[in-house]
Image: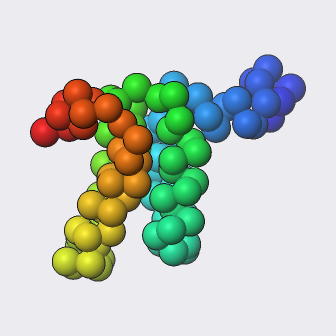
């Protein structure tokens, strides 16, 4: 991949320009790991990203959680958003509404 795209995998993965591709892969992987690991991974991944890209990622990764897990899926999504926004300034959190 490094030679083909003139980038390292680390840079490619962390680039928010690839949010749609990354999100589609992470959506499939999210079902295989516990919520705490998903929270840590996504917090690492989105560090420095714009709010819009983070919203796209969360929406894509969690879009089927309510369907497959019901109320627990909704609670898991809320917990994920809480983990991602834990250190945000209030003006950024207000933009989520």
Please tell me whether residue 26 is drawn above or below residue 71 in the rendered image.
above
Residue located at (61% from left, 34% from top): 14
Residue located at (24% from left, 33% from top): 90
Query: Image quadrant of residue 89?
Result: top left
Q: Quadrant of the N terminus?
A: top right
Please tell me whether residue 45 is drawn above or below residue 11 in the rendered image.
below
Q: Quadrant of the C terminus?
A: top left
Q: Position of residue 56 (x, y in %)?
A: 34, 39
Residue located at (48% from left, 58% from top): 39
Q: Which residue extends farthest top?
A: 6
Q: Count the numbered circles shown.
A: 0
Which residue occupies the foreground of this view, 5 or 58?
58
49 on left or right of 4: left
Which residue occupies the foreground of this view, 89 or 67?
89
Please tell me whether residue 75 is drawn above or below residue 52 in the rendered image.
below
Query: Image quadrant of residue 83?
Result: bottom left
Q: Is residue 62 visible?
A: no
Q: Which residue extends farthest right?
A: 3
């Amino acid at each position: 991949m490094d030679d083909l795209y003139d980038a390292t995998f680390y840079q490619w993965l962390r680039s928010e320009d690839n949010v749609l591709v990354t999100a589609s892969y992470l959506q499939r992987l999210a079902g295989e790991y516990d919520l705490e690991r998903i929270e840590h991974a996504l917090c690492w991944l989105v560090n420095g990203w714009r709010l819009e890209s983070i919203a796209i990622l969360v929406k894509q990764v969690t879009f089927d959680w309510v369907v497959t897990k019901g109320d627990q899926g909704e609670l898991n999504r809320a917990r994920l958003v809480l983990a991602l926004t834990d250190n945000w300034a209030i003006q950024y959190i207000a933009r989520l509404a």
